[in-house]
Image (cartoon, coloured by chain):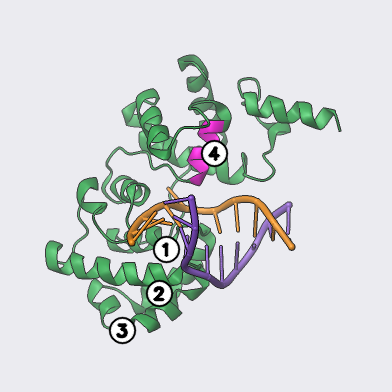
Chain colours: A green, B purple, C orange
Amino acid sequence: MLNKKQIRFCLDEIGKMFPDAECELTHSNPFELVIAVLLSAQCTDALVNKVTKDLFQKYKTPEDYLAVPLEELQHDIRSIGLYRNKAKNIQKLCTVLLEEYSGEVPRSKDELVKLAGVGRKTANVVASVAFGEPAIAVDTHVERVSKRLGICRWKDSVIEVEETLMKKVPKDEWSVTHHRLIFFGRYHCKAKNPNCPECPLLEVCREGQKRMKKRESI
DNA sequence: CTCCCGATAT
DNA sequence: ATATCAGGAG
């Protein structure tokens, strides 16, 4: 496990690598962001953006998503994958938005996670990106990177990872750090071929050092 | 825990 | 061919 100083080093170095890390899901309001993040489960941002380009032209409001049959919405998001669950959740979510929140996206995480298809990660993203609340959404990248670096333990659950990050990262850096960890995981510390040889964190990364040794022996 | 699921990179 | 992708619900 990394100590406080080592974690500070990691955050600073990752900050240098990705100073402008931000949400890559295209959206122009909180409602579009909720839809985009919901769609992004187990799917790349690039593909979500490709689909939402047309989707957001056709559907502007919760009413619009409820005005078409479920099958039509399924068809419109089919290329995303998991489209049956996602289409159903979007219509459920829109119903609740209209009935409980007069068509607006609620700001608090507690309200957000109650919406269909919105779990802890999505709620954190929306709270952070749309409403400026300090939050650390733990997705596949944040989890993998935190575990490889030794910011948390390998066996930690996503909630434990989130709690550890909130404890070890200053609150005013939560949102930036969250995005930088995603960029680091997406473009450098990738699931398949992490770029350990060119990693500025190699000196503190046990996983990276392990992988480098494995390379030498081949 | 399993299921949902197509697109893309490797 | 197979792993992976800004997960969530039952």
Q: CA distance from mark 1 to mark 2?
A: 11 Å
Instruction: Give the residues drawn in magenta, as a range.
Output: A140-147
Q: Position of residue A10 (x, y in %)?
A: 53, 25
Identify the mark nearer the N-term, 1 or 2. 1
Query: In the image, is residue A117 part of the stretch drawn in magenta?
Result: no
Q: Which residue is mark 1?
A: A39
Identify the mark nearer the N-term, 4 or 1. 1
Q: Is residue A170 above or below residue A99?
A: above
Q: Which residue is mark 2?
A: A55
The disc placed on residue A68 is 3
- Decide: few, some or many residues near mark 4? Use Cα within 10 Å; few <14, some 14-19, many ≥20: many
Who's the residue at 34% across and 71% down the image? A88
Tell me which chain the residue with mark 4 is part of: A
Secondary element type, mark 3: loop
Who's the residue at 24% across and 72% down the image? A62
The disc placed on residue A47 is none
Kindly identify the amino acid type of the residue bearing the numbered disc 4.
Arg
